[in-house]
Image (cartoon, grey):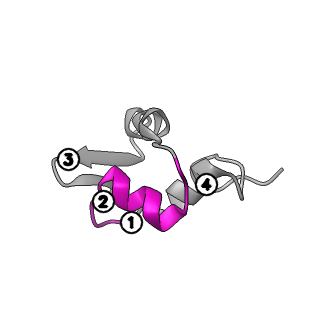
Amino acid sequence: RDADRFGSPTGGPAAKINAALGTTPKKMDQLMKEAGVERTFYGHLKKLVAAGLVEKSAAGYSIKK
């Protein structure tokens, strides 16, 4: 199965969250709304932050520049 740029299976909910990420920080509720998912993905985003792919700030999550 194909994977997105962060290694999540394409078409899956984690990939939808990844697709909603951009360089402008977004809060979880905004990411969920844009991705069309019903649950939070804090654990998933925590892994991406730990891997140095995503940044977490007071404004939300964003792709590391």
Q: Position of residue 62 (x, y in %)?
A: 33, 56
Question: Mark 2 and mark 3: span between their CA atoms?
Answer: 9 Å
At 38% from the left edge and 48% from the top edge, which residue is drawn? 54
At label 2, the amino acid type is Lys
Q: Position of residue 36 (x, y in %)?
A: 55, 62
- Name the residue carrying label 2: 26
Q: Is residue 62 left or right of residue 4?
A: left
At 15% from the left edge and 48% from the top edge, which residue is drawn? 58
Magenta-colored span: 22-38
Question: Badge 3 local density, few (<14 within 10 Å), some, or many (20+)?
Answer: few
Question: Badge 2 local density, few (<14 within 10 Å), some, or many (20+)?
Answer: some
Question: Mark 4 and mark 1: span between their CA atoms?
Answer: 13 Å
At label 3, the amino acid type is Ser
Query: Which residue is outermost to the right?
Result: 1
Dots 4 and 2: beta carbons under 8 Å?
Answer: no
- Name the residue carrying label 4: 15
- Quadrant containing the C terminus is bottom left
- Name the residue carrying label 1: 22
- Name the residue carrying label 3: 57
- Please name whichever residue, 62 or 40, is drawn nearer the observer in this view of the structure: 40
Mark 3 or mark 4: which comes first in sequence? 4
Question: Badge 1 local density, few (<14 within 10 Å), some, or many (20+)?
Answer: some
Q: Is residue 24 left or right of residue 43?
A: left
Question: Mark 3 and mark 1: span between their CA atoms?
Answer: 13 Å
